Each structure stands twice: as structure tokens, then as C-alpha cells.
Image (spheres, rainbow, N blue to C red):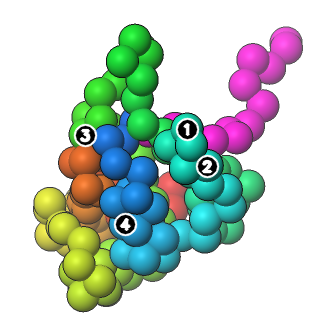
């Protein structure tokens, strides 16, 4: 059988203000910026421990896709989500759901939710499976 998907290169999100987004992802989340183009409002950040990039750009007027502030369901991993949230708060980032224990059949993990300046939400979890 031929594999249709062989990996994940990048996740792209739409944002309204490239400078606010850069500050959040670089200074609040601590991601490494790998590219930036102010002329077209685009930036890319490395996701630690992977070859996957988090890319963002200002959504064009006729461009399809999700509106800025509507992304959710992307999970970042951290061994201690509560500690990560405390640091995010210290750096000025918003927490939209405090770290909490989740218990489901065959798994127990902690998760929290943070939001970027546009309201795009990201889960921080210690879940490994």
C-alpha cells in the first residue's frame, strides 16, 4: 500500500499582526524563529525536538482558510504543563484554561490551554501517547 502522508513539515496559522505574533511565539513561548519576512508578514518558528515548523502569516483578503483566532486542537508537549503556564503568565501570555488533570480510560495526563494575541489556542500537555 502506498502511504499518502509520510510526515509533518509545518503547521500554518493566520494572524493579524506579525510583530505581536513574533513577540508571543519568541518571547512568551520561547520558540526559535527561523525565518521572518516583514514585507509579506510571514514568520516561521522551530518546534523543539522535531523537524516541524510553526508558520504564520497575515491572512490576505481573498485567501481561504481559517480566520485568525480560530485555530485550536494543536498540542504542544511539556513535562509539567502547570510550570509551563506559570512561566507563560510571567512572560505576559494568557492562559485560557488552567492546567488540570484529565483521566480517560487507559490514560491520565495534565493539560492547559494558552492563546496567542489573535486568540488561536494551543494545548500544552504532558500526554505521551
Work out whether mark 2 precedes mark 3 in sequence or the reverse, and give the earlier one.
2
Query: Badge 1: how crowded within 10 Å, few (<14), some, or many (20+)?
Result: few
Above or below: residue 7 compared with residue 30 = above
Q: Mark 1 sits on what residue? A: 40
The residue depicted at 50 percent of the width and 43 percent of the height is: 41
For the N terminus, give its image quadrant.
top right
Taking the magenta stretch, the answer to whether it contains residue 25 is no
User: What mark, if any, has residue 69 been given in the picture?
Assistant: 3
Q: CA distance from mark 1 to mark 4?
A: 19 Å
The residue depicted at 37 percent of the width and 66 percent of the height is: 24
Q: CA distance from mark 2 to mark 4?
A: 17 Å
The residue depicted at 55 percent of the width and 50 percent of the height is: 38
User: What mark, if any, has residue 24 been given in the picture?
Assistant: 4
Taking the magenta stretch, the answer to whether it contains residue 11 is yes
Mark yes or no: residue 45 visible: yes
96 or 17, nearer to the observer: 17
Amino acid at each position: 500500500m502506498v502511504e499518502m502522508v509520510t510526515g509533518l513539515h509545518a503547521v500554518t496559522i493566520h494572524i493579524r499582526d506579525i510583530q505581536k505574533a513574533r513577540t508571543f511565539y519568541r518571547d512568551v513561548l520561547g520558540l526559535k524563529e527561523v525565518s521572518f519576512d516583514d514585507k509579506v508578514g510571514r514568520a516561521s518558528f522551530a518546534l523543539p525536538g522535531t523537524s516541524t515548523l510553526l508558520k504564520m502569516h497575515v491572512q490576505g483578503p481573498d485567501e481561504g482558510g481559517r480566520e485568525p483566532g480560530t485555530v485550536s486542537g494543536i498540542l504542544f508537549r511539556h513535562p509539567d504543563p502547570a510550570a509551563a503556564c506559570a512561566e507563560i503568565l510571567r512572560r505576559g501570555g494568557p492562559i485560557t484554561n488552567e492546567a488540570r488533570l484529565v483521566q480517560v480510560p487507559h490514560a491520565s495526563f495534565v493539560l492547559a490551554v494558552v492563546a496567542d494575541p489573535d486568540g488561536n489556542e494551543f494545548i500544552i500537555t504532558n500526554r505521551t501517547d
